[in-house]
Amino acid sequence: MLNTKLLPLAMSAFFISTFSYGQSLSEFHIDKGNNCQTCHTKPIKVDDAENHENKSCESCHGTMGELAAKSKSKLSPHHSHLIDVSCTSCHSGHKQPVFVCQTCHDSFKNEFKIPFSNDKPVLDNYQFPEVTQEMIETALAKAPLEQHQVIVIGAGAAGHAAAISARQHGVADVVILEKQPYIGGNSMLAAGGMSAAETVTQALKHYPDSKALWYEDTMKGGHNINNPDLVKILTENGSAGVDWLQAMGADLTSASSAGGHNAERLHRPTGGAKSGPEIVNTLKETAQKLGVETRTNSKVIQLVQNKQGVITGVLVQGKHSKLHILGAKAVIIASGGFARNNELVAKYRPDLKGVDATNNPGNVGDALTFAPKVGADIVDVKEIQAFPTAAAGKMVISGTARGAGAIMLNNDGERFCDEMGPRDKVSECIWAQKGKDAWLVFDETVLDRLGQLRGMLDLGIIFKGNSADEMAKATKMNAQKFDQAIKRYNDFKVKGKDADFARKNMADDLQYPIYAVKIKPAVHHTMGGLKINTKTEVIDQNGLPIKGLFAAGEVTGGVHGANRLAGNAIADTIVFGRIAGEQVANSIK
């Protein structure tokens, strides 16, 4: 039932600039005649996910969708592509709010003012309080608060795939721990697709491919420092992973090419929508149906190990439950990489110091801190990838945009490389240009093929021109050079040969109206991480498996070598996540 005392606030849809910021959200509520039980249980007990509080918000203000519908702006912080983002992901009753949207969207910083921020810099991610070694030792001295069969660290695609697989193989009690207030991790942001070869989708579209060719492309893309055994597992099991997702209801009925791939093998939804949300949402719904419990705002800070060296649980820092131990018969680490930790990135790649990242703010390399403490070995940690086409240096514009026909021009309006090259090579080409950035240029045909681009139009970062002069006015490129570049590329397309850069896939010619978005490379994927074997067991520094400890996804190293190909990350999460779940089930049995 709607609380009429809060109706004025509800109708304001939160994001307005007329609040008095000298008070907190809770004080504002009290001034309106409410009390603690308006938002909390009686007696007050707040779970880490803040489920009751979020339901209380919705009972007065409406759902996120309803708030977004009330917005008069094309953009609304309440219309989010993130799955399970909730009111308390940003709003806090007693502390400074955070503003999740501004993680990627700089325009939100200027266009929207989050209430009760007191005009101080607003964080884009909840910061857990620092804990001392004494606090950790005190918590470790206590018995586990709960005992479970399997604990999965991280609620991205790898974590969900592992949890579902464990359930499918007979494990009744599986808990996913996620430190963010919402699920999805980097998988949620995946724009391109899931690599796989010899799939039904490819067969129906008459796209020739083979697992052997995918293996060859992946090894070549990784500069042949990949672990061949892991790459073999990836490429042999990708098609089964696609079948598995489609059986759950995922739309992966389209396939396209991208840099480094010699076939149309990036599987994604029809219409070019982002693959990440489609896959994560499918996994989330399946996990819920199977009874997998997911706890957000729950940060793992240490693994618990007995005297025999077996992993027996995790030490968790809950947003409200504080430090506590959860016991488990096995633990799967699926916490992602460390691209958002620029200090750590720069430690291994000084040339990337200060470079923005495309990653979820939670990807800071927690596992690289707590896993080595139990003996876990690390591999390929210096191999860090920059994504070439990041809008505003943060938002991924999938390589499938280039596969669908987009080209790249420098600030003078000239082409400068093969747009379909591997990510590392394309990034190097862009960095070599004046300004160390470039323009991604495409037309309506590409927009139709890649629906995710249409979603970026309202962000004000894509420019449209009906002529070379209009495009030059909007972007400051040289109109004559721009016009020549378009005509020359179209001529190459007609002749079927790119005489300048030997691009193989030219898709179509470019016709007005033409669009352009400023791009530059951003830190995107950390290929290195925990060392695993083909059973996803974490390997210690003596080359032996650590009993009870498994890992899958970007937190691991060895699969991608020195450079990851587009679509191989999602394939990595699904293939090795499934294996981790099965192996955990076998180890428990």
Image: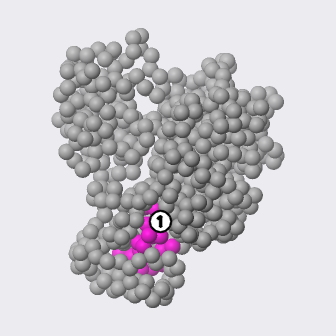
- Percent position (x, y) of residue 93? 34, 25
- Does the segment drawn in magenta span residue 584? no
Q: Is residue 270 visible?
A: yes
Going by the numbered disc 1, the residue's amino acid type is Thr
Q: Main secondary structure of the magenta part?
A: loop
Numbered disc 1: secondary structure? helix
How packed mark 1 is, by other alpha carbons closer than 10 Å (few <14, some 14-19, many 20 or more), is many
| Residue at left offset 40%, top offset 63% | 450
Name above or below for residue 111 compared with residue 222: above
| Residue at left offset 47%, top offset 65% | 400
Which quadrant is the C terminus positioned in?
top right
| Residue at left offset 36%, top offset 44% | 80
Residue in front for this viewpoint, 509 or 555 = 509
Q: Residue furthest top?
A: 43
Which quadrant is the N terminus positioned in?
top left
| Residue at left offset 43%, top offset 84% | 493
Rendered image quadrant of residue 446:
bottom left
Labels in figure, total: 1
Q: Which residues are magenta?
A: 397-420
Residue in front for this viewpoint, 27 or 286 = 286
Q: Which residue is mark 1?
A: 400
Rendered image quadrant of residue 415:
bottom left
Q: Is residue 381 visible?
A: no
- Percent position (x, y) of residue 321? 52, 22
Name above or below for residue 22 compared with residue 346: above
- Percent position (x, y) of residue 492? 43, 86
> Does residue 339 appear to the left or right of 509 in the view shown?
right
